Image (tube, rainbow, N blue to C red):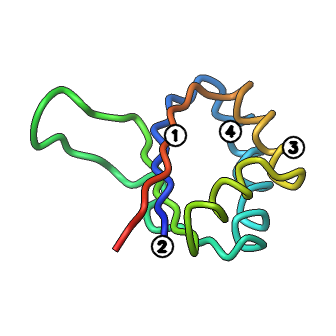
């Protein structure tokens, strides 16, 4: 069953975040993933949730998404993201 990874991001170092983005795409593709949403404008319909940046990834299944997140390939990019932004990330099964 496909899985989605939802990422809410608050960028505090835009230049470094651009470096993170350069390292990410190849790691996602290696694990059969793809971007569904990548940083487009958001608009809150209910509540006070209004992320600065929202990214949604799709992977073949939850385990593959977790393998990507924990991979050596993504670890380099992840370290850069930790320096450039604050993030919240979820993985959820999809239809």
Q: Secondary structure at mark 4?
A: helix
> Which residue in the structure is indicated by mark 2?
2
Q: Please name the residue shown 70% across and 65% down the image.
A: 28
Pointers 4 and 1 in contact (C-beta within 8 Å): no
Q: Which of the two labelled residues, at mark 3 and mark 2, occupies the earlier sequence position?
A: 2
Question: Do the residues under discs 2 and 1 have CB atoms within 8 angstroms?
Answer: no
First reached walking from the N terminus: tag 4 or tag 3: 4
At 42% from the left and 62% from the top, the residue drawn is 93
For label 1, count other residues whose C-alpha is less than 10 Å away and answer few (under 14), some (14-19) or many (20+): few
Count of picture labels = 4
Question: Which of the two residues, 28 or 21, is positioned nearer the viewer here?
Answer: 28
Pick whichever, 63 or 21, lies toward us: 63
Asked if 91 appears above or below 15 in the picture, the reply is below
Q: Is residue 83 left or right of residue 43?
A: right
Disc 3 target residue: 76
Tell which tag, 4 or 3, sits nearer the viewer: 3
Q: Which residue is mark 1?
A: 89
**How far apart, in angstroms, are the residues tagged by discs 2 and 1?**
17 Å
Residue corresponding to mark 4 = 17
Residue at image location 78% in from the left, 72% down from the top: 30
């Amino acid at each position: 069953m496909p899985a989605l990874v939802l990422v809410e991001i608050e960028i505090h170092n835009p230049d470094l975040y651009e470096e993170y983005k350069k390292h990410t795409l190849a790691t996602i593709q290696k694990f059969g993933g793809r971007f569904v949403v990548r940083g487009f404008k958001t608009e809150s319909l209910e509540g006070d949730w209004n992320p600065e940046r929202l990214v949604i990834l799709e992977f073949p299944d939850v385990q593959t998404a977790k393998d990507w997140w924990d991979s050596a390939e993504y670890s380099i990019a992840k370290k850069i993201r930790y320096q450039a932004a604050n993030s919240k990330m979820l993985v959820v099964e999809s239809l």
